[in-house]
Amino acid sequence: MKKLIIGNWKMNLGLKGSLALARALKGLKSKNEVGVCPSDFALAGVKAVLGKSQIKLGAQNCFWEASGAYTGQTSAASLKELGCAYVILGHSELRALGESCRRVNLKAKAALARGLTPVICVGEDWTKYKAGKSRAFVSGQIKRALAGLKLGGKQLVIAYEPLWAIGSGRPLQAEAADATQAFIKSEARKALKQSRAAVAVLYGGSVNAANAKNFLRQGNIDGLLIGGASLKAQEFKKIAETH
Ligand code: PEP
């Protein structure tokens, strides 16, 4: 099965930097499905640079209402119009600023209704990890984020990102990630009440070109969500071409 590799550029690049990175990546050829998520202001420009490249476009957030007086928000419909295939929802950096599971749930419903694949981030902090509470915690996040979600034939992506592994240079052991990801897929299918729902589970947290293969060869890791390493063109290409 194709693995899915998504780069999250976060708020690291301006317009010029985003276009330059897109130019450096556009020739990438991979058996994996590959996506990049620039800032909203760069989506149209990056899309134009990528042209017929195999790299798909994603956004880092969206709003749940279709239009109206919502200053500073971007609707799922607008992201679709800009050519996005995915939208990352509930990233831990947004949750740290107050994003709730309830909001993630509303956003996921809006994304699916507009034909975007939601990439819903879940993950426990260090205290919960050390206390052996990772599964109980992510299970709660999944239940709340997926409540009432109707997938139909569409795909849902969940990114398992232990908070302490993000940007720390200390990834979770691949075998441990694999086991938790099998649990996450099963919890997500239960929450969706669809035993065969198309749910892909990505791992995220300090993945680089040197350790990517170790994650991708695990049977329950359907792909990777990459932060820091997605900003370095050669490194991201290597990760994207790993299988
Ligand atoms: C992330 O922030 O989603 C992430 C995985 O970051 P990094 O790859 O830098 O750990």
Image (spheres, rainbow, N blue to C red):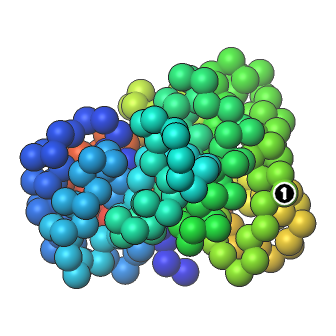
- Residue 52 locus on image (x, y percent): 22, 81
Where residue 125 sits, quadrant-wise, is top right
Vertical position of residue 234 compared to residue 144: above or below: below
- The residue that disc 1 covers is 148
The crowding category of the residue bearing disc 1, from other C-alpha atoms within 10 Å (few below 14, some 14 to 19, many at least 20), is: some
**Does residue 123 appear anywhere in the picture?**
yes
- Residue 106 locus on image (x, y percent): 69, 48
Secondary structure type for disc 1 = loop
**Residue that appears at 18% across and 49% down:** 18
**Does residue 200 appear anywhere in the picture?**
no
Vertical position of residue 21 compared to residue 17: above or below: below
Seen in the image, is 39 located left or right of residue 134?
Answer: left
Could you say which is closer to the camera, residue 4 or residue 116?
A: 116
**Residue that appears at 31% across and 35% down:** 11
Where residue 128 sits, quadrant-wise, is top right
- Residue 92 locus on image (x, y percent): 55, 33
**Residue that appears at 54% across and 22% down:** 97
Q: Amino acid at mark 1?
A: Gly
Where residue 194 sits, quadrant-wise, is bottom right
